[in-house]
Image (cartoon, rainbow, N blue to C red):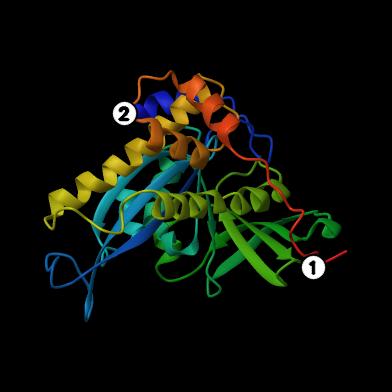
């Protein structure tokens, strides 16, 4: 219910690129646990952990789907549980390259953008003109020719080659979206880093590093509680048109949660109580 409400409130948020359809980023993060306390979640020889598979709506960075598994579960397996929205674009890293599952996405009338693996075997069918000054190197319609990939993905696909000048890195993308401009494919993948920022935010600011219970159910409850807090703050920010960022809102609520002060008044009180920064006694390091 919170996910549905938050997504509705942030549906008008603009992306870095112009799209007339929903765009999601799919990724996972591992939360490390102590093996002696959580023996049901073995990860490595002396560690335990759980993996939080997340589908993030890029409009407003709202998590649209979460699936919590053991850390040993492969990322690509979550594609079997993914709720699909017809016409939406799902952006993934190369850990999700599984041609049978990607073909199932295409058959379900959804689009994917995934970073291709270097050893992908293909045959070029068409080449489309690109502006090399933008970083694009090629835009091709291809047929997969690998022993398994040709069978698992029998339809034509689109291969976009982009050179990232900032990091001096060649990036190859595979997609079934033929109408999207080639440069938008690259920019859409770049926007996937919003999900990394989401993982970083909840790990830094919410309680999912130390757990109150040691059972699988207790761990899942605490993770879902943290995500619910994130969603509630996002909803509050949008409903009351608060200009502060989510971390600032979380700070204010954490110190006024047991007060009967209206939330907007609490923000005004906190701001008025902040002392002015006096830098008169500070050394100047740089002119």
Q: Secondary structure at mark 2?
A: loop
**Mark 1: few/some/many CA within 10 Å (<14, 14-19, 20+):** few
Residue 137 falls left or right of residue 262: right
Q: Which residue is mark 2?
A: 258
Residue most toward the right?
Answer: 287
**Residue 3, image quadrant:** top left
**Residue at the (62%, 48%) spot, across then down:** 188
Residue at point 84% right, 55% down? Answer: 131
Question: Where in the figure is residue 141, as x and y percent of width and height?
Answer: 64, 55
Determine whether the residue tagged by mark 1 lies in a helix, strand or loop: loop
Quarter of the image with the N terminus in it:
top left
Q: Is residue 20 left or right of residue 210?
A: right
Residue furthest to the bottom in view is 45
Say which of 116 and 277 sits in front.
Answer: 277
- Vertically, is 162 above or below 271? below
* Figure check: 74 above or below 63: below
State the CA–CA distance, disc 2 to disc 1. 43 Å
Q: Position of residue 262 (x, y in %)?
A: 43, 18
Q: How many marks?
A: 2
Q: Which residue is mark 1?
A: 285
Q: Which residue does the image show at 58% across and 25% down from the upper left?
A: 12
Query: Which numbered marker is on residue 237?
Result: none
Instruction: Between residue 35 and residue 192, name the one nearer to us.
Output: 35
Compared across the picture, whether 180 is left or right of 60 comes to right
Can you see residue 124?
A: yes
Q: Is residue 111 above or below residue 283?
A: above
Quarter occupied by the C terminus: bottom right
Look at the image and tell me whether residue 155 can be seen.
no
Count neighbours of disc 2 (C-alpha within 10 A) and say few if under 14, some if 14 to 19, many if 20 or more.
few
- Percent position of residue 160, x then y: 66, 58
State which tag comes first along the sequence, 2 or 1: 2
């Amino acid at each position: 219910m919170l996910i549905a409400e938050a997504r509705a409130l942030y549906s008008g948020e603009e992306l870095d690129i112009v799209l007339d359809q929903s765009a999601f980023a799919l990724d996972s993060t591992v939360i490390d646990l102590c093996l002696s306390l959580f023996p049901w979640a073995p990860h490595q020889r002396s560690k335990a952990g759980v993996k939080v598979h997340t589908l993030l709506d890029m409009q407003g960075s709202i998590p649209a789907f979460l699936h919590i598994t053991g850390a040993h579960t492969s990322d690509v397996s979550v594609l079997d549980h993914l709720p699909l929205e017809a016409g939406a674009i799902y952006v993934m890293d190369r850990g999700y390259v599984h041609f049978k599952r990607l073909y199932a996405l295409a058959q379900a009338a959804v689009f994917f953008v995934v970073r291709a693996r270097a050893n992908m075997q293909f045959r070029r069918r068409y080449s489309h003109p690109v502006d090399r000054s933008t970083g694009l190197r090629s835009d091709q319609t291809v047929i997969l020719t690998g022993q398994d990939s040709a069978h698992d993905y029998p339809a034509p696909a689109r291969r976009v080659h982009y050179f990232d000048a900032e990091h001096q890195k060649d990036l190859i993308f595979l997609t079934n979206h033929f109408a999207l401009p080639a440069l938008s494919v690259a920019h859409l993948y770049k926007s996937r880093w919003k999900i990394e920022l989401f993982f970083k935010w909840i790990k830094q600011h919410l309680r999912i590093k130390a757990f109150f219970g040691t059972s699988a159910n207790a761990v899942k409850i605490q993770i879902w509680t943290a995500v619910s807090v994130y969603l509630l703050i996002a909803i509050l920010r949008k409903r009351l048109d608060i200009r502060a960022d989510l971390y600032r809102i979380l700070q204010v609520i954490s110190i006024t949660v047991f007060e009967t002060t209206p939330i907007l008044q609490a923000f005004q009180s906190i701001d008025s109580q902040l002392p002015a920064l006096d830098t008169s006694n500070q050394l100047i390091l740089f002119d």
